[in-house]
Amino acid sequence: MVDDFAVESMYEVFAAAPKDGPKRYRIDCYTTHMTGNGEPIELLKLFPWSAKKMIELQKDQEELFNRFRGLGVKLEFTNPPKGLGKYVPVFGRNHLKNSGVGERVFYVRGFNDDGLTAGSVDFAVKFTGEAAARLKAGFESIDTDEGNSDYEVEIDQQTRLIVDRGVPGQSMIYDILLENMQQSLSSIKGMSALVPDGRGAKALAAAQTRGSSVEVFVSPAIQSNPAHPFSFGNMLWMAEKANYFNMQRNGVSFPVFRNQIRGAHGKCWIFDGKTAIFGTHNASEKGVKAGTCEAAIITTNQKIIQGLQNVFSQTKLESYPDIKGVI
Amino acid sequence: MSGKERKFYCSEAGQIKPAEYGTVLSADQHYADFRLEAERAGKGELVFAQTMAFGTPGRENEFW
C-alpha cells in the first residue's frame, strides 16, 4: 500500500466490506488536479523541469485508484475543473468529507482521507438509525439535485444539517455562525484550520469586549514555502498576512491559540456550552468568496457537545498559549 | 502503524462493538469503527465515503 495511514485505513475498510456488496468512494477533483503539496498539476506540466514528475505522479495516483477499483469500489470524481480552472483548481471545490454504511451509519467529519489532515487535530461524529438515513439523503441531494440555494435538513429534534451549495459569496453556514457569535453571552470556543477573518473576526472581538470568553484554536502559523511557489499553502499564507494586516489596522483582537505540535484541521464552534456547529466550513469569509461546497451540523445534543469539549481540552493540553498567536 | 494494528476504540472487556450515536471519534477511531461497521454491512448495503483530498504519492511535508 501507500505510505499514508488514512489511505491505508480506507483501503482496509473497503477490503473488510462484503466482497460482492456495493462500495462507492467520491473524491473531489482537487485530488486529481493537485499534487500532494497543493500545486496545480496541469500548471506544473507547462514547465519542462517538472512536466515528467507530474506525469509520473498522475501514473502513481492512477495505480492507487486501481487498487481501490480492484476491491470493487466505484470511484466517482466530483467537480471536474473546466478551462482555466484546471490550472488553478482551488475555487469552487467540493469540500465535503463523510463516510457511512447504508442508511444506518453516517460519520460527519472534518478530515480528508490523507495522513496530513487525518493526523491533525480533527474528529468525526457518528450518527446511527433514522438520523444516519436523513444525513445520507441530505448529503446525496448536494450531488444529485439541481439548483444553487443553500439548504437545511432536520436530522432530529436537536440537530440540523446545513449545506452550502458553493455559490461564491453565499453561505448559510457562515451566516448561522455569525449569528451565534453575535448572540453568545458567556463563551465561544472555536477551532479551524484558519484564523477567522472579516465579519467573523469582528464578531469574535465584539463578543470578547462584551464579556464572553473567546478561545480560538488554529494550526501553527502557515509558512511560505519557496520550494512550492504555486502551492495552495502559499496562497493561504498570503491571505493570512492580509488578514493579519487588516485586523491590526482595524483594531480587531481576540485570543488565538496555535497548536505547536500538529495542525488543527477540525472545524468546530461551541457557543455558551449549549450549541455546537461543526463540519467542513473554516469560518473564513474568504472561503465564502471562493465558492466551496460545505456542510455543517448544528446541534444542542449534550452528548455530542461534551465529546467536542473533550477535543478542545485535548488540544489545549498539547498546545500552549503562544503570545505571538494572540492577535 | 497500519490500520490493522490499531486498537478498536470500541473494545470493551475484550469485546469489539461499534461506537454509539453521537460519539466523537478521532480519525484513527473513525477508521477502526468504520471498518467494523463495513464488516457488518448487510446484503446490498452501500459502503461509502467522500473526501476532497486523498493521500497522494509524492507529498512532501507541508501543512496548509
Image (cartoon, coloured by chain):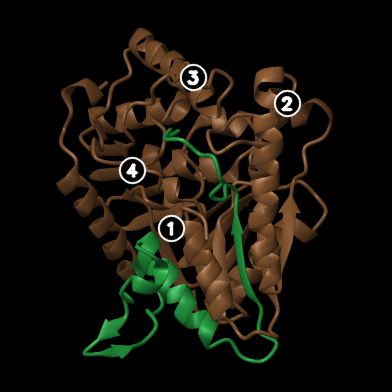
Chain colours: A brown, B green
* Chain containing the residue with disc 1: A
Q: Amino acid at mark 1?
A: Phe
Toward which corner of the image does residue A16 lie, by quadrant?
Answer: bottom right
SS of the residue at dot 4?
strand
Report how far apart the C-alphas of labels 4 and 3 lie in the structure: 32 Å
Report how far apart the C-alphas of labels 4 and 1 lie in the structure: 27 Å
Residue at the image position 36 percent from the left and 47 percent from the top? A120
Residue at the image position 20 percent from the left and 34 percent from the top? A211
Report how far apart the C-alphas of labels 1 and 2 lie in the structure: 28 Å
* Residues beneath discs 1 and 2 located on the same chain: yes
Name the residue beneath numbered marker 1: A5
- Count residues near mark 2 (Cα–Cα under 10 Å), then give few for <14, some for 14-19, many for 20+: some
- Count residues near mark 3 (Cα–Cα under 10 Å), then give few for <14, some for 14-19, many for 20+: few
Report how far apart the C-alphas of labels 3 and 2 lie in the structure: 16 Å
* Chain containing the residue with disc 3: A
* Residues beneath discs 4 and 3 located on the same chain: yes
Q: Mark 2 or mark 3, which is nearer the start of the sequence?
A: 2
* Chain containing the residue with disc 2: A
Name the residue beneath numbered marker 3: A227
Quadrant (top left, top right, bottom left, bottom right) of the C terminus of chain A: top left
Residue A160 on image: x %, y %: 52, 63
* Chain containing the residue with disc 4: A
Q: Amino acid at mark 2?
A: Lys
* Residues beneath discs 3 and 1 located on the same chain: yes
